[in-house]
Each structure stands twice: as C-alpha cells, then as structure tokens.
Image (cartoon, helix red, strand yellow):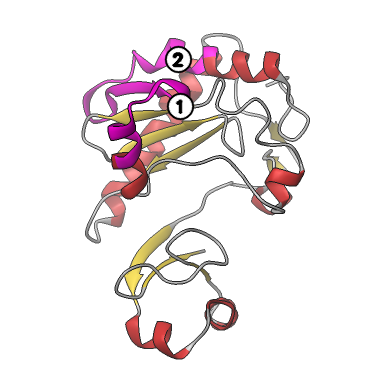
Amino acid sequence: MGLSLPAFTDKVDRAKVEDLLKKGFDSLADDLKGKYHELGKMTPELTKELRSNGNLFQEPAGPALLAAAGAGRDWPNNRGIFCANNSKFFVWVNEEDHMRIISMDRGGNIKDIFDRWSRGVEKVRGILESQKSGYQFDEHYGYIHTCPSNLGTGLRASSMVLLPKLSAALTPHQMEDFAKRCGVQARGGAGEHTPAGPGGKWDISN
C-alpha cells in the first residue's frame, strides 16, 4: 500500500516491497512453511529446477508490453520467490506485480488447492498489516494490479491439460481463439502466445 506498481516503480519501492515480505515469511507455518530465494543469488541448479517445473518467473524481454513498459528495470535486484517446503505454495516477489501468491498441486483436488491459497492470502495479509501495510484495494475497481485486466479479485485459476489432437490441428493463435469461444484462456508451454508444451500440454484458465 502506498508503493507504486510497475512500470513506474523504482529501486526504493521495489526494495521496500521485498523487505516487507521477507520479514514475514519466517512466520509462515505448517504446509505454508518454506524459504525465500533472492533471484540474483539462486544457484543454477535451483533456478533450473524451479523453471522446469514452471514455478519461476523470468526477465521480461523483447517487444512485449511488460518489457516495453520497463517492468524489467534493475533486474534481478529485489526480486525473488518464496517456496514452501512441500512445493505446493509459492510467492513471487516483484515480478509483474508486487507479489503473486500461488497454490498448486498435481491431480484434481481443487478444494485443497483453493483452501491452501486462501489461507496463504490471509497469512500474507496479516504479515503486511502487522507492518502497517496491506493490499491495494479500491471500492470500485477491487484489488489493484499492474495489468488492468486483473482488476477485481485478481484470481486466476488454471489447470494443465493434454490436448494432443487439438494441438496438432490448430496453430497457437487458432487454439487461443478456440479457447476464447469456450469462455476460457489457453496458454502454451512457455506462456501466452506460445505453442503447446510436451504432449500437447496447455494451461487452461478463467
């Protein structure tokens, strides 16, 4: 709260965000307990492991909107990822937004995944409010994010599914259009506007 978002954020704001969160991560317990890793100090082995599992963000590059807006300034300073010991709960720090809270698991136990995410959101809220900070919220727009399309709840729920026949028949752009007609979004193996992952894997979300 009171800290600017990318693309306007500067070194001071980014460091403040990281400091607020790092002070509270040690208080997370049980299935939320874990360790914070600074992006610039991670070992190549850990970086490879997290990235191969789809758990680690990377520097925005190319002509894409985030890169053009300057969201990658001072990379990788004051950016990192909190990883729960069970590898089912993560908090990204200073990626596109101040933070991104993630709950994930293999299988279809959506209730368990959502319960862990909800508890994590409230625990992090408590961490921030204990330091006289908090989530940025507007009565009209809802929760505030860097991208206007995320205004409101800011919640994205997704499932990784294998669609080999559709992947073989459609280009990535056609697949995205097809998903849109079904009321969902399809992201490829490396994010938005990319081809399917191995075996025709797509990230299907609201």
Residue at label 2? 22
Callout 1: SS: helix
Tell me, yes or no, whether the highlighted magenta stretch contains residue 20: yes
Residue at label 1? 39
Whether residue 5 sits left or right of residue 99 in the image: it is: right
Q: Is residue 171 above or below residue 191?
A: below
Spot occupied by residue 152 in the image (x, y as percentages of width and height): 65, 47
Residue 5 shows in this picture? yes
Q: CA distance from mark 2 to mark 1?
A: 13 Å
Rendered image: mark on residue 55: none
Q: Residue at x 26, y 50 (%)?
A: 105
Q: Which three-letter amino acid code belongs to the residue tagged 2?
A: Lys
Q: Residue at x 46, y 59 (%)?
A: 190
Q: Is residue 43 above or below residue 173?
A: above
Spot occupied by residue 90 in the image (x, y as percentages of width and height): 37, 35
Q: Is residue 97 above or below residue 19?
A: below
Q: Is residue 78 above or below residue 177?
A: above
Other-residue count near label 2 (Cα within 10 Å), few / some / many at <14 / 14–19 / ≥20: some
Residue 147 shows in this picture? no
Spot occupied by residue 92 in the image (x, y as percentages of width and height): 47, 33
Q: Nearer the viewer, residue 105 or 35?
A: 35
Callout 2: SS: helix
Q: Nearer the viewer, residue 122 or 98?
A: 98
Q: Which three-letter amino acid code belongs to the residue tagged 1?
A: Leu
Bounds of the magenta segment: 19-48
